[in-house]
Amino acid sequence: MWVCLTCIYMSFIIFMMHQRPDFGRQSLGFLDKNLNKPVTKEMHTYDDNCELTWENFSANFDHYYIVHLVDWFLASFVIRDAWMLHFWHLLDEVIELSFQHILPHFRECWWDHIICDICLSNIPAITVALFVMDRMGIRRYDWFGRDGASSFFQWKIFHCHKRLGVVIY
């Protein structure tokens, strides 16, 4: 069932990637009428006021903070490799920074990316999940092939094209 749902979702994503942005917005507008509205100055974005004050800082702990926590906690049970998870969550923040000119909800203050997202949600969620996995006896994975390697260049990822392809995928 999960494979079928994943295939349907991925087919939808591939289909939407080949459409014009206006068609995508109109299509998703059937799910939520707010998606068809352009972002105006009156709408709240996370870069409204980038002063590092307690009011601005505490205002960013909303439903997106909970989503970050739950997402990285659950992703840790799928990936099960601390190095891969930390690389992935940092790459996720770089992608948010790269696409903030296209997607307005990715616009955040510098301290929101670093302090709120990375230090107070992603890293704690990954750490707690890995601790829970260790306590439950769930086996961890070694995506990069670090076990038994004495240096960075001896990691198995650099010696096996299949492992490198899977990690990149």
Image (cartoon, rainbow, N blue to C red):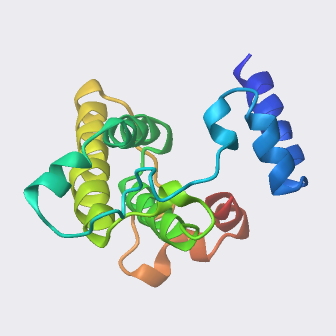
Q: Is residue 153 above or below residue 135?
A: below
Q: Residue furthest top?
A: 1
Q: Residue furthest front?
A: 42
Q: Position of residue 88 (x, y in %)?
A: 47, 60
Q: Position of residue 36 (x, y in %)?
A: 70, 42
Residue 13 visible in this rendered orientation of the protein: no
Q: Position of residue 138 (x, y in %)?
A: 37, 31
Q: Is residue 38 above or below residue 132?
A: below
Residue 62 visible in this rendered orientation of the protein: yes
Position of the N terminus, as image quadrant, is: top right
> In the image, what residue occupies the spot 42% across and 58% down?
89
Position of the C terminus, as image quadrant, is: bottom right
> In the image, what residue occupies the spot 53% across and 67% down?
100
Depth check: give the residue in front, 122 or 116: 116
> In the image, what residue occupies the spot 59% across and 77% down?
158
Q: Is residue 168 left or right of residue 143?
A: right
> In the image, what residue occupies the spot 67% across and 58% down?
166
Residue 136, image quadrant: top left
Depth check: give the residue in front, 111 or 149: 111
Depth check: give the residue in front, 140 or 99: 99
Depth check: give the residue in front, 52 or 91: 52
Residue 150, image quadrant: bottom left
Q: How many marks?
A: 0
Q: Is residue 48 left or right of residue 145?
A: left
